[in-house]
Image (tube, helix red, strand yellow):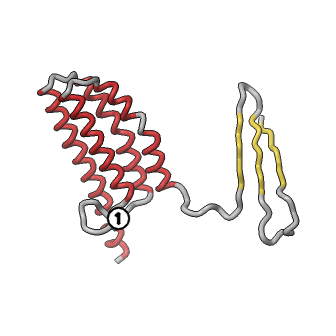
């Protein structure tokens, strides 16, 4: 029974990835045709298509790392925040691209503008999948600085645990790596 459950989960996950991929390809074709009608250079279109790649890649990686199998925007019920976000971003991408093509605006500038949002959204999507939801038990702060060829200095602050003396102060240790 476990194998059939894993198979069903993988199938749902692959369907979510497949659906997103097909939506992106369909929009790619629509923007391509719109570009042909309005005589938009294909190198401009290709750079604009690249501006969405970071978002979609981050979503696909995060969905593979931490799947949201019980939710989908295409089914009744709850939807994954990540899935909603990727489709909202894709809709905004499509709207901006269409407006630029129809009004003969600079698609390369729109690509840079849209792409500038990539680090923020991608970090959010990947962070949801890769970061722990609760802080670790022992708090450890690490700071690393490199100035030209100077050695790296790492400061580690360790807080005492509940077992240790309540009056004990925080210890600072500095480690120099060459």
Which residue is rendered at x = 26% and y = 47% of the image?
A: 21
- Residue 4: x %, y % from top left: 31, 72
Residue 168 versus residue 117 in the image, above or below:
below
Give the number of callouts: 1
* Residue 125 placement (x, y as % from top left): 44, 50
What residue does disc 1 label? 69
Residue at 38% x, 31% y is 113
Drawn side of residue 128 relative to residue 42, left or right: right
Q: Residue furthest bottom?
A: 1
Above-or-below relation of 134 to 50: below
For residue 55, above or below residue 10: above
SS class of the residue under badge 1?
Answer: loop
Q: Is residue 52 left or right of residue 161?
A: left
Q: Residue at x 22, y 38 (%)?
A: 28
Residue drawn 68% across the image and 64% down it: 137
Quadrant in which the N terminus is drawn: bottom left
Residue 4 vs residue 92, the one in the foreground? 92
Q: Quadrant of residue 103?
A: top left
Name the quarter where the C terminus is drawn.
top right
Rate crowding at label 1 as few (under 14), some (14 to 19) or many (20 or more) other CA atoms within 10 Å. Answer: some
Snapshot quadrant of residue 134:
bottom right
Q: Estimate the x, y position of residue 61 in percent, counting from the top left.
A: 41, 50
Relative to residue 55, is residue 159 drawn left or right? Answer: right
**Residue 92 or residue 75, whichever sits in front:** 92
In x, y percent, where is residue 52?
Answer: 33, 38
């Amino acid at each position: 029974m476990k194998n059939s459950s894993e198979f069903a989960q993988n199938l749902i996950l692959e369907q979510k990835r497949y659906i997103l991929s097909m939506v992106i390809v369909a929009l790619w074709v629509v923007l391509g045709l719109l570009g042909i009608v309005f005589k938009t250079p294909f190198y401009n279109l290709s750079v604009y298509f690249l501006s969405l790649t970071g978002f979609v890649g981050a979503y696909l990686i995060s969905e593979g790392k931490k799947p949201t199998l019980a939710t989908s925007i295409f089914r009744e019920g709850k939807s994954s925040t990540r899935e909603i976000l990727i489709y909202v971003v894709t809709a905004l991408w499509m709207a901006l691209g269409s407006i630029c093509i129809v009004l003969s605006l600079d698609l390369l500038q729109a690509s840079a503008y849209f792409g500038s949002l990539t680090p923020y959204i991608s970090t959010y999507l990947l962070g949801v999948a890769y970061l722990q939801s609760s802080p670790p038990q022992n708090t450890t702060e690490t700071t690393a600085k490199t100035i030209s060829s100077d050695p790296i200095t790492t400061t580690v602050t360790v807080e005492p645990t509940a077992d240790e003396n309540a009056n004990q102060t925080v210890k600072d240790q500095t480690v120099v790596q060459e």
